[in-house]
Image (tube, rainbow, N blue to C red):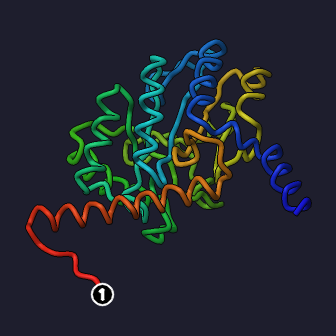
Amino acid sequence: MDTLLNRKLNNELKYHFSDFTYENYDRLLCFAKKKYVFRTYENFHKSENFIIWRHDVDFSVHSAYELAKIEAENKVQGVYFFHLHSEYYNLLEQEITTLVKKIIELDHHIGIHFDSHYYKIRTENDIEQYLIFEKNIIERLFSVEVKVFSFHNTNDFVMGCQKWKYAGLINTYAEYFQKEVGYCSDSNGHWIYDRLEDLLASRKHQRLQVLTHPVWWQKEVMSPKQRVWKYIDDWAAHRKQQYLLALSNLNRLCIDW
């Protein structure tokens, strides 16, 4: 039992579980504002000490909306990248569509979280073709102009695709961002390179791109596994309630044994 407790405590400290709360998110934004000017991919100046606050929405649009509200309260803009092929949400579902529109209404930008694996892409020409396809869908769905994209689940091929733009869209993995701008990410629910708070305090980078995945941020301190399990369980429970409500509205029964 002591060994299990020690392992839990070690993981909590090693992976900074307490960093990933909404309260700390607000604190990190305030800290970042003291160090950098917040910019988006379309409006930064290379001479500035700028920070771009990016979100790849792999799992939870609900969590993305929570972060968007915190950012709006701090008067900063984030850039939210949505995935047309996510196995965890559907952009065409009314509730999800509404949440994305609310994020836009909070003055945030949106982009495409582009899954090259879905199309089995092997060439840069294929990237252009399918980006145009997805750009048209998202622009018509949300009535906004999309100007930027990020790759989903990067590999050697896409990391080597370093042009500034593909299909007229700014590439967040362009050569400039890879070589001239610092990078910090919470992939898989922990800081995979530098801890964001330490990076902000050190001023290691004059220019910084911060990547978050909204599902990893919660009200309470949790392990990464608990955070994603909570999202899946909560969404399943929500689905059940939606089904029961639909039956009730139609005066139909939910028959069990």
Against 220, residue 198 (above or below) is above
Q: Position of residue 28 (x, y in %)?
A: 63, 25
Identify the image quadrant of the N terminus: bottom right
Q: Residue furthest front?
A: 257
Identify the image quadrant of residue 154: bottom right
The residue sitting at 38% across, 29% down in the picture is: 108
> Which residue is more in the foreground, 218 or 101?
218
Q: Residue furthest top?
A: 34
The residue sitting at 48% across, 61% down in the picture is: 232
Against 10, residue 244 (above or below) is below
Q: Where is residue 226 in the image (x, y as percent from the top left)?
A: 62, 56
Residue at which label 1 appears: 257
Against 13, residue 247 (above or below) is below
Identify the image quadrant of residue 19: top right
Is residue 87 toward the left or the right of residue 153 in the image?
left
Q: Which residue lies furthest to the left in this view?
A: 251
The residue sitting at 44% across, 57% down in the picture is: 234
Identify the image quadrant of the C terminus: bottom left
Q: Which amino acid does label 1 sit on?
A: Trp
> Which residue is more in the foreground, 83 or 60?
60
The residue sitting at 61% across, 34% down in the picture is: 210
Against 137, residue 174 (above or below) is above
Label 1, secondary structure: give it: loop
